[in-house]
Image (cartoon, rainbow, N blue to C red):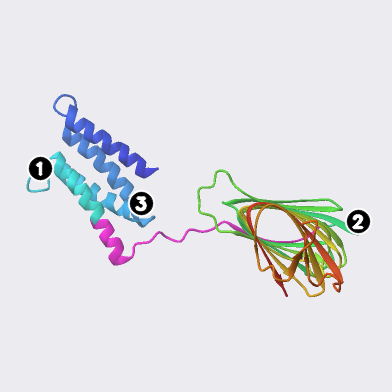
Amino acid sequence: MAGRVILIALGILIVLSVIFNEFLVSFSLIEFFFGVIFFGYGLSFFKRRNVGTLGSLIFGIILMIDTFELFPSSLDFWQLVLLMIASYIIAAGFSGVFHIRKPHLKVNKSIISENLPPKFTGDTLDLSTDVDWSSVTIDSSKIDTPVKVKAVIDNDIYSFRKEYDSSKVDILNKLKVSNVKVPERAKITLYLNENINYNYRAKLNVSVAFFDLRQIKTREVRVKSTASKITLIPSQKDNTTVDVDSEVSSINIKLPRDVALVLNHVGDLNFKNFERMFQREDGTYVSDNFSEASYTCYLNISSEISHLNVEFM
């Protein structure tokens, strides 16, 4: 904002000095006025150490000295323009020599750790996550409640909230519309109870997700992803149906030895490492351990320009 004010002020200085100086205004008065502006903005160098504030400080001092005629001869307009350019060049040089840096800004972060929901009834929990620019991890744990949430959130960048009742938990972490900072990914980890059944829905927007469901009873998993990277390990405790709606995303499936994969896909999907998968007459793909596997993951993918990789653990 201050830089824009200086540009406007410089433009006004040029217009008034070149066009109207002889008729309406005193050049010394204008010079003093803008000397105060540049000098005042330059004083913020001691708080915000950068090239812009140092250059303004130097040029403001030059303007003030010339205003009070402390130089051997008075400077004309174009000499002042050259001196302004020289001021910022000098500031840039000092920046390289003395490593002028902005001071470390305090980050308004929250560290969240909470067990949800406080009161749980039944044997199945509906769990959902809706996140932007986040790193989401799901893992199993020997906990008393259905979900333990751990998160590190920058409150200046994200709007984080949790909603729950006795049978569901919703975790939301959305970028604030007013945010202009380059965001660091929020980190969210969900620990799930190994003795509870889950229906899980995830909405990922430019995020990274690692879902380790090996020791979790997941009956149904639905994922909608945009420009995200997903790694999923299916459950070894139950058959699982996984529906993925993917746009420009990378999906990596890691199969435990005792879990088979049945894959059905629609859309533009780039396959990699399908040596242990064979295609049936109906167009679906089946892993070669299907007959001896204890459980099966039924993976349905609807995709646009996405990538799928299958690994056998």
Name the spot of residue 84 as percent of width and height, x first: 22, 47
User: Which residue appears at 30% of the width and 64% of the height?
Assistant: 96
User: Can you identify the residue that label 3 sits on?
Assistant: 44
Type of amino acid under label 3: Ser
Residue 255 relative to residue 124: left or right:
left
| Label 1 Cα crowd, 10 Å radius (few <14 / some 14-19 / many 20+) | few
Contact between marks 2 and 1 (CB within 8 A): the answer is no
Tell me if residue 271 can be seen.
yes
Name the spot of residue 126 as percent of width and height, x first: 83, 54
| Label 3 Cα crowd, 10 Å radius (few <14 / some 14-19 / many 20+) | some
Residue nearer the viewer, 231 or 253: 253
Q: In this picture, which residue range is highlighted in magenta?
A: 90-116
Report the Cα–Cα distance between label 2 and label 1.
85 Å
Type of amino acid under label 1: Ser
- Badge 2 marks a residue whose secondary structure is loop
Quarter of the image where one finds residue 31: top left
Q: Residue furthest top?
A: 23
- Badge 3 marks a residue whose secondary structure is helix
User: Which residue appears at 54% of the width and 55% of the height?
Assistant: 183
- Give the number of the disc on residue 3: none
Report the Cα–Cα distance between label 2 and label 3.
58 Å
> Is residue 111 shown in magenta?
yes
User: Can you identify the residue that label 2 sits on?
Assistant: 121
Name the spot of residue 263 as percent of width and height, x first: 76, 60
Residue 39 relative to residue 70: left or right:
right
User: Can you identify the residue that label 1 sits on?
Assistant: 74
Type of amino acid under label 2: Thr
Dot 1 or dot 3, earlier in sequence:
3
> Is residue 198 shown in magenta?
no
Residue 304 relative to residue 17: left or right:
right
